[in-house]
Amino acid sequence: MRSGSSKPLPDLWKETYDLVAQVPLGRVTTYGAVAKALGDVVASRFVGLAMSRNDDVVRVPCRRVVQTDGYVGGYTGGGPQKKIRLLKSEGVSINDMKVVDLDRVLFDDFVTSYPLRALRRRQRSLRKHLSLQRRGDIDTVAGVDVAYEDDRSYAALVSFDYESGLELDRNVIVGRAKFPYVPTYLAFRELPLISDLVGKLDKNAVLMHDGNGILHPEGFGIASQAGVEFGLSTIGVAKKLLCGQVSMADLRSAKPVIVNGVASGYALSKGRPGKPIYVSPGHAISPELALEVCQRFLIHRIPEPTRIAHIVAEAARAEATQK
């Protein structure tokens, strides 16, 4: 495992509540402003989730967090109308569910360590170790996926023989996700959950991940980070294209995805041309070999390792929630 990959993660829930606790009487902030204080505006939706789960409205005045356009939004302490009453009692003017003169009462002067910026720096440090070269034979291909019930996690890994395509083994680990879902930071949520499963794979295995490899705005998606951290060849298999352009001039079922003039992955279709998957190398494998591995296991739209891992993870979640 790469140096730095096992560093403790920030408690983003606590960081968010501590930020909101700084908003003074008579002022409001926004979900976006809190997200920026965490280090990345993409965390805005998570800030909303954190406010909806806040159970200490005295220390953490979530009533003082409003939408970026000034609309008051929801309030778990009693609904929007109570939120309006409380804000008015604190001297904040509200008209038609919207804060009047938002710029004047907006608070965004947070004292913060910008925890998401630190995680982004960690990602970029790990990216320096990224390789697209595969050395050695492939014996097994393993798919991994995680299902969730709130913060309870059900991580599944299913292994297949590379030559025969036959399933070899399947394992599930039940745990708890300590880091929330924040777009482009998914690896920090999921990799701790799958580390014990992946640790059983040897160097001749390829790990197939439900997510992106280098077809990612940072050029380093969850499959890439998993590969570098775990020291494995990895492939990203995603359902959405986050960057690049599909070369429609190519008439094959696998169309190159071009990023900065280079074919960094492939849009791969199986029976439904309108719903391709996006295959890209994660680490220690080339785009062409990543495609070859996926095609070898392509019976349905999703390659069997990740398709079956998803089914196993969801079954484990469903069984647990029915008890």
Image (tube, rainbow, N blue to C red):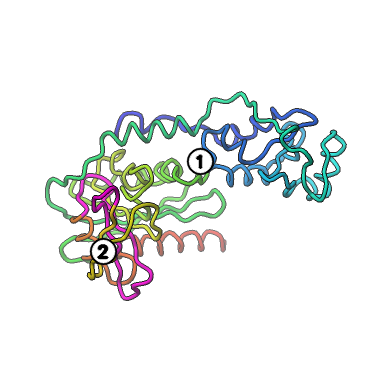
**SS assignment at label 2:** strand
Image position of 278 (left or right of 262):
right
Write the start and end of the magenta stretch as one range: 259-287
The residue beneath circle 2 is 255
Location of residue 54 by image quarter: top right
> x, y percentage for residue 41?
54, 40
- Disc 1: which residue: 179
Circle 1 packing at 10 Å, graded few (<14), some (14-19), many (20+), is some
Q: In this view, does 182 lie above or below 142?
A: above
Q: Which residue is drawn at 50% across and 44% down?
A: 182
| Disc 2 versus disc 1: nearer the observer | 2
Residue closer to the observer: 1 or 197 = 1
Task: Look at the image and say whether residue 265 sits in the magenta stretch.
Answer: yes
Query: Of residues 81 and 138, which is closer to you in this image?
Result: 81
Where, by quadrant of the figure, is residue 4 drawn? top left
Residue 78 shown in magenta: no
The reply to whether dot 2 and dot 1 touch (C-beta < 8 Å) is no
Q: In this view, does 4 lie above or below 309?
A: above
